[in-house]
Image (cartoon, helix red, strand yellow):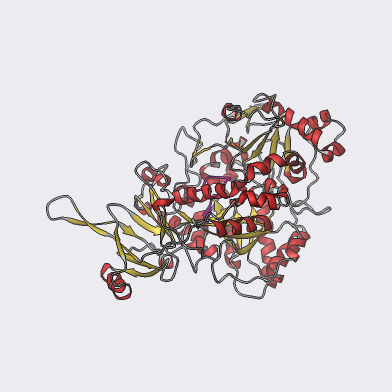
Amino acid sequence: MEKSHKHTHGCTHCSCNNPVLEILKEEIFSAENLTKMNPGSGKRGHENRQPLMISTGIGIGIGAGVTIRTGTIRPMIGGSTDEVDSIGIADGKVVVTGSGEDVENYMDTNYPGAYEKKELKGTQTLLPGLIEPHVHMIPTAIMHDWLDVSPFDGQNLRSVYDLSFVESIVNKDIPKIPGYVILGKGLDPSLMPFVLNDGEVGLQDIDNEVLDGINKVTPMMLLAASMHTLYLNTPALKHVFNHSSEVRNEYESVENYISETGGKLQEGLHMTPALMTVKVQIIAMSLQINSHLTDLFKMANSRGITFMYDAGLNKISEILLTIYSETHIERVRTGGAYLCTSQDEVDQLKPYTEPDQYKPAYLGHAKVVSDGSNQGLTGYQSVPYLCSPADNTGIFNFPQPGIPAHTIPPSYNTLINTVVAVKGWPLMVHANGDQAVTFAINAYQRALAQYKGPELRNRIEHCSLLTADQITNMLQMGVSPSFLIGHVGYWGYAFKKVIFGEKAQMLDLCGSTLAAGMRITLHSDNEVSPLGPLRMMEQSITRIMEKHTTSIEVLNSAECLTPEQALIAVTYDAAWQCYADKWVGSLDDGHFADFVILDQDPLTLTTQSSQYMKMRDIPVLETWVGGVCVYVKDQAGKLATEKDMNFSENG
């Protein structure tokens, strides 16, 4: 029998509050560790950035004397997808856009003989740099070297993802190190083949006995993709019991610990003592965090990303990102939301000031995590999940004794009110389950009724399950959603078949929110799902449930976006939602020259057959940050080396 959870806030339901980062908050900043992380500045002197004019070209069409324009430039100025012929760049910023003649005259007048020209060929398409408005950079970098037991192969679901696959990853080349514990990440039972439980179709259950079937000798800890559960085999449970006085004080014996937890440790209350027993190993694997961040940013560049907004910054991650920016070339611009896990932390917030100058890891929002993960069965629901365990409605992070389940806890109202009405901060509320979304909307209504100040860009993160009335309420309050669109593409079939049933029709109502007049964004919550704005566009446009591979099945086709709407969501509106629209999201005059050149215009993919599993794979030819090329795709599809690039200055 699983031990009941004595729930307190601060639990780790998703990447928004990573348990690994939490246990490293003191040790990782020792003088010795900081020296190991930064053996010396890796930042070269910045080379001069030569002014540049990029234009569409003229090609030869079919038949004698027929000419066609080659290339496409969509600067997304004002959120418009209209094309221009040319763009002029100088000092890392856009200085002019328009017709080829006008741009050339401007460049000749202001930079005579000093600028280069570049012409787009064939179907090459220039767009503003793509934006990931909700990611988790530091946790991803810290866990870089953990075994990847996730269901993803690049941006696609693995063709085979089951316990045998996990076994093949876990048991390959186990280091022969005394005391070594296998550490893995991304385990996701919801994307494994469904199983029959008492005649009912359900999700694969994973406990210590199942993991013993994979490896019963070496201690093994596998962190769920949603970050709310740590799975342990029996040797790992014994390791934790023998090395944690906290666990020994709570459980009578190792047998009692094994039988009551079943190797499924949920939330920070139970996960942290286990992770503390491997803290030295985690620290050793984290010391290359700067190179891991570079790998992450290179991956982002290869997928056209020039801006990443971290949805869970704390003092640790803010410092680490700042240190990185001071010693490394800027490949992506960064900002984020400051994670508040208690009323005390909210009370300590300084009054909000909207950022007016860009700096790496700037703070645009405060962040509150109200519930868990729907695919992890901890998103807070108004009615129980369809699958086992029975009567499970998930977890709300702010419960109060004596408060009925469907009544919003006063402490939650107080916290939201303090952030918004008292401190004046824009807020991002993580809310997955329909009851959590209801609570978030109600709390916003109370807080905004008392707020006196400039308009805030308040958000609901994931905002997975919505109703028409809630959309109206959000519109009236000026609260916008950011959708983890992989819930539809990757997990939609599991939600519809096993987890929610027809309730899955409420998932990620992109079309309805736009039709109501709202501005929306799409995000990956990386590394809950892979980086990839083009993939997110595709999933919002097609809404095809990818796990259901026997046929093409769309989840609620009325909610499909047009390609134009999807492009706005990952550029112009994403910048606006992140308080970055003064710098990025479009190629307006004075904005950073952050842009991407694709091999094909995604807006020309207008049929389901041309979009599905194809838009995500449009080759990214070049990615530029501050007028400097930071990524080039060569014929072999490899990253350009640093010797092949110029670099941009921070800010």
How far from the left and from the top, in percent, is residue 518?
A: 52, 63
x and y percentages locating residue 459 in the rendered image:
60, 61
Whole-percent x and y of residue 575? 50, 63
* Near-viewer residue (510 or 527): 527
Q: In which quarter of the image is residue 194?
A: top right
Q: Which residue corresponds to the image point at 63% horizontal and 46% vertical from the top-left?
A: 287
The quarter of the displayed image where residue 635 is located: top left
Q: Exactly how many numbered labels are in the figure?
A: 0
Return the residue nearer the eye: 255 or 405. 255
Q: Nearer the viewer, residue 340 or 332?
A: 332
Residue 485 in sight here: no
Query: Which residue is depicted at the point 36% across and 50% down?
Result: 606
Residues rendered magenta in the picture: 521-531
Q: In this view, does 296 lie to the left or right of 1?
A: left
Q: Is residue 651 left or right of residue 240?
A: left
**Which residue occupies 44% across, 62% down?**
626
Query: Outermost residue, front direction?
Result: 40
